[in-house]
Amino acid sequence: MTSSSWKYVAAFTLAAAATVQCFVSPVTRTASRVPVMPVCMADAVADPIAAGAISGDNIRNIGVIAHVDHGKTTLVDALIRQSNVFRDAAQADEAGERVMDSEDQERERGITILAKNLAVMRDGIKINIMDTPGHADFGGEVERVLNMCDGVLLVVDSVEGPKPQTRFVLDKALRRGMKVVVVVNKIDRPAARPDYVVDKVFDLMMELGASDEQIDFTTVFASGLQGISGMDPDELTEDMKPLFDAIVSAIDPPKVESTESKDLQCLVSNIDYDQFKGKMGIARITNGSVKANQPVALSRPGKDKKTGRLTSLFVFDNLGKKEVEMASAGEIIQFSGLDGVEIGDTLVTNEGGVEPAEPLPPIAVEQPTVRMTLGVNKSPLAGREGKFLTSRMIRDRLFKELDRNVALRVEETDSADKYAVSGRGQLHLTVLIETMRREGFELEVGPPVVIYRTNEETGKVEEPFEMVEVRVPEEYSGSVIDLFNTRNGELQDMGLDDGGESMSVIKYLIPTRGMLGLRSSLLT
């Protein structure tokens, strides 16, 4: 790995394998569940503080980050159910499990794909919670959401400990100076080893260059499935109160320089659509305040302003949102009235006689690593399944996806009926293709290829590579090693798992081109 290499994280799900992606100069190496249930909100829940009038000191904005399958969404479920979000037990049962994973593919695959917002009230404190994906192919969602947070809950499995995606998301949070509350989840597992996990998290923070304040992190032991938590693994309470208390005490309230309307700075981090209100922006107010029906502008460095007026203003409330007249710095809002809103725009005031604030730096995410071509189906069976078949329909749909999917890239090709689509991994692109198929699109899909880039400093061509960790039974370790060697992998480490399950842990450094098709080979 060179000092100028890009760092990514990807998760490779097979035999508990995980990867970390980077770019290096390419060299030739010798072989050495259930359908979505309707979610109802409790409209009658008492809110002690009027919406839009909550002071910054009574707000906590947190993101929930973790490696894939470490129990983030189940933990958020427990927080929701113990916050009076549902009217009664019957409504909670109707909502089902993993309430935040509301998309069809999320339920079927058992993973979180899109980051989502919710807000709960706890002892007069409003906690805005952002649930994020754990798979590195959707790391763009994590990078985008962290712009709205003041701190994070780092969820770590009580047996596995930190994994590659843990490193990726934690590094992003630490670079932003955020405080971390470590949640050792699944503490009820028989093989749980909390002391080992906490030590590994401490070592990881040291390795990532955390500050003294960040390293002095608060640790909570919990089981999202059981809805229990505590500050000591041997003394757990029957609810999530210790975790709520840790969030309020360990995570700082938003830092606000001004609440004056003229100082409005509000970075748009997400886009939503409403069939009645049209395109809506989701943003966190950094400074100033905003009112419904206020003249505003969307500003971005180096680009012309887009002016308009807010026709409606919302804040998040439980699993939904409610309309308010005003919101101040520190709050996360959703607004309509500006059809040209894009992720990375800064909402500023456009009132007459007022000098607006400067735009905030736009959101920066890591670059794609894999490219595929999507185009018109030209096979003999074309037109038998889909409703949207033409090049124009496919093009419009792909470019519309760019409004929300910040890590995706779509480019025209030499062919008028094919488009190059680049993403953070095969799963990233696979989810998009499956979504389009379910919407009625019929596509011709090309094979995935790795994206190479030229380093501007050295002039050398670089390719993405991945650090892979595979956990397999001991009897299969020889086959796994042989397979990785034939794909130009370099063995980095090998040993037995400390969990006492007779599992071998194998770590390899391998080019992303060697990872393409690897899962099928391992399964056979």
Image: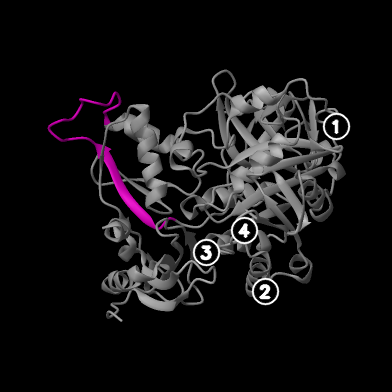
Upstream in sequence: badge 4 or badge 3: 4
Upstream in sequence: badge 3 or badge 2: 3
Q: What stretch is highlighted in magenta?
A: 368-390
CA separation in Å, label 2 and label 4: 17 Å
Question: Is 159 on the left-hand or right-hand side of 221?
Answer: left
- Callout 2: SS: helix
Q: Residue at left 86%, top 30%?
A: 49
Q: Is residue 347 visible?
A: no
Q: Looking at this rendering, what residue extends furthest in the top direction?
A: 276
387 falls in the magenta region: yes
CA separation in Å, label 4 and label 3: 12 Å
Q: Residue at left 72%, top 25%?
A: 322
Q: What residue type is labelled 2?
A: Met
Displayed quadrant of residue 187: bottom right
CA separation in Å, label 1 and label 4: 35 Å
Disc 1 crowd rating (10 Å Cα; few below 14, some 14-19, many 20+) is few
Q: Which mark is residue 206?
A: 2
Q: Do the residues labelled 4 and 3 touch (CB within 8 Å)?
A: no
Which residue does the numbered mark 4 point to in the structure image? 156
